[in-house]
Image (cartoon, helix red, strand yellow):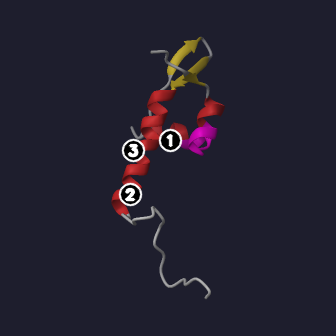
């Protein structure tokens, strides 16, 4: 199986996190650590980033198990 390595910008796009958030979450042990690609370059394994996203999705679903996957909100009603 071929492993794909994502550079930081691709990780930002894929996760929606800013650079500072990525590094804050790494420091807290909440985000995958990168691998060294060269003296001044790092990258993240795409499988690990996908697993991180899957974990966030599973946490959301456990917190709000709505049959259609939508978040339930307070008093807002649809017009009708």
Secondary structure character of the magenta stretch overall? helix
Horizontal side of 21 relative to 52 (left or right) equals right
Q: Position of residue 4 (x, y in %)?
A: 54, 20
Q: Secondary structure at mark 1?
A: helix
Q: Residue furthest top?
A: 38
Residue indicated by mark 1: 24
Q: Does any portion of residue 71 appear in the rendered image?
A: yes
Residue indicated by mark 2: 61
State which quarter of the image contains the C terminus.
bottom right
Q: Position of residue 17 (x, y in %)?
A: 58, 44
Residue at the (56%, 13%) spot, across then down? 37
17 inside magenta stretch: yes
How many residues crowd around disc 3 within 10 Å: few (fewer than 14), some, or many (20 or more)? few
Residue at the (54%, 39%) spot, across then down? 22
Checking the image for residue 55, the label placed there is 3
- Up-down relation of residue 12 to residue 73 (above or below): above
How many residues crowd around disc 1 within 10 Å: few (fewer than 14), some, or many (20 or more)? few
Give the magenta part as a residue range. Answer: 12-21
- Image quadrant in which you'd find residue 76: bottom right
Tell which tag, 1 or 2, sits nearer the viewer: 2
Residue at the (64%, 39%) spot, across then down? 13
Give the alpha-carbon distance from disc 1 to disc 3, as whole Å: 18 Å
Give the alpha-carbon distance from disc 3 to disc 2, as whole Å: 10 Å
Q: Residue furthest left?
A: 62
Q: Position of residue 56 (x, y in %)?
A: 43, 48
- Up-down relation of residue 57 to residue 64 (above or below): above
Q: Secondary structure at mark 2?
A: helix
Horizontal side of 24 relative to 78 (left or right) equals left
Among numbered discs 1 and 2, the one appearing first in the sequence? 1
2 inside magenta stretch: no
State which quarter of the image contains the N terminus.
top left
């Amino acid at each position: 199986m071929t492993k794909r390595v994502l550079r930081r910008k691709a990780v930002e796009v894929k996760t929606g996190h800013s650079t500072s958030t990525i590094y804050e979450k790494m420091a807290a042990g909440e985000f995958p650590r990168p691998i060294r690609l060269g003296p001044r370059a790092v990258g993240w394994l795409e499988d690990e980033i996908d697993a991180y996203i899957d974990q966030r999705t599973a946490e959301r679903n456990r917190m709000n198990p709505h049959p259609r996957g939508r978040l339930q909100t307070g008093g807002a009603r649809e017009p009708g």
